[in-house]
Image: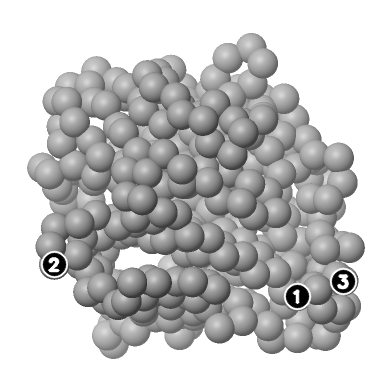
Amino acid sequence: MNVRLILVLMVWPFAAIAQGFAGLGQGAEGFATPRPGVALEFPADHGAHPSYRIEWWYLTANLKGEDGRSYGVQWTLFRSALAPETREGWADPQIWMGHAGLTTPERHFVAERLARGGIGQAGVTAVPFGAWIDGWRMQGRAAEGRDELSALSLTAQGTDFAYDLDLTAEGPLVAHGQSGYSTKSESGQASYYYSQPFYRVAGTLDLPEGPIAVTGRAWLDREWSSQPLDAEQKGWDWVSLHFESGEKLMGFQLRSTDGAYTSGTWIGADGRAEPFEDGVLTMTPLGRARVAGRDLPVRWRLELPAKGLDVEIDALNAQSWMETRFAYWEGPVRITGSHRGEGYLEMTGYE
């Protein structure tokens, strides 16, 4: 382990006794907090918000090889702040963490990077858009006059895998909750949250057996806050689903000892968003698997009666465990029932 990595780990802000998953229920004293009625601003909000404690750029892709074989890719850059400011050099309180995953029906590959922002090792720029940590990059390639996230290139490498993908958006950005203000609990925790769920993808996966040309679709989530969870919320179950009809669904439930807080956004094929508040979307576990010493629900029933939705989602690979500093489950799923399609499932806080 090199000296830089040791220093990063020594000051990583979630290393203290956690409140909620990965400490996301810690208090927000000294940091900015989301407020309802604040309009999202583009392209500025594609960049970093250092006055908030936690932020991420989170992309998942459902892909197929030329033989119809299914794959999944994840690329995530997290920013976490020790203080609501930026500085040059090692004194910079902005800390960065990158996760990359690649899923096949038989294997799940994982890599992680940790960095400090003030030395140029990681960061994000809004114009031109670019997000990076070490050699991993999410780079904007938008045409003049288009949104900075309308076209991206995406690269990451692990010890035994890599990918190089091009993404082109075929629909608009989508704001969740109240025009981007996404409530997370009855006590009022919230984040700013929007997505670009309309990417078409083409590129190459590099696996131990060799390169594989793939195509598919992807979903980018952008979210920032300073206390996105209530202290009693221990984790979440989150989905991003692409239906064959062209419609889409973002949904999550945040689990606590006395129940779950749910939220969802139905996205029309034209990009029109319809938010649903707590209790409207239901997520019921149907089947479990033994994963990393845990019994995890890898098959779910999702119901949204207002949209005639009653589907089951099933993991492509039940062993899609992200063995990272704060471990969680993340992998592609297949959808059957009233709607058919594919998507991604994330589950955190299972002990």
Task: Identify the amino acid type marked 2.
Answer: Glu
Residue 137 lies, in percent from the top left, at 49, 79
Q: Quadrant of residue 340?
A: top left
Tell me: 194 left or right of 215: right
Q: Earlier in the sequence, mark 1 or mark 2?
A: 2
Dot in front, 1 or 3: 3
Q: Check residue 66 in the rendering and tell me which mark sits there, or answer none.
A: 2
Q: Do tag 1 and tag 3 residues touch (Cβ < 8 Å)?
A: yes
Residues 176 and 244: in front is 244
Q: CA distance from mark 1 to mark 3?
A: 9 Å
CA separation in Å, label 2 and label 3:
44 Å
Left-right relation of 88 to 75:
right
Viewport quadrant of the N terminus:
bottom right
Q: Which residue is at a point 48% across and 60% down the rendered structure image?
A: 109
Please give the name of the residue rendered at 66% of the width and 65% of the height, measured from the top-left corner: 97
Q: Which residue is mark 1?
A: 116
Instruction: Give how far across and how far down residue 205 sits, in percent.
Output: 33, 72
Q: Residue furthest front?
A: 209
- Where disc 2 sits, the SS reads loop
Q: Is residue 265 visible?
A: no
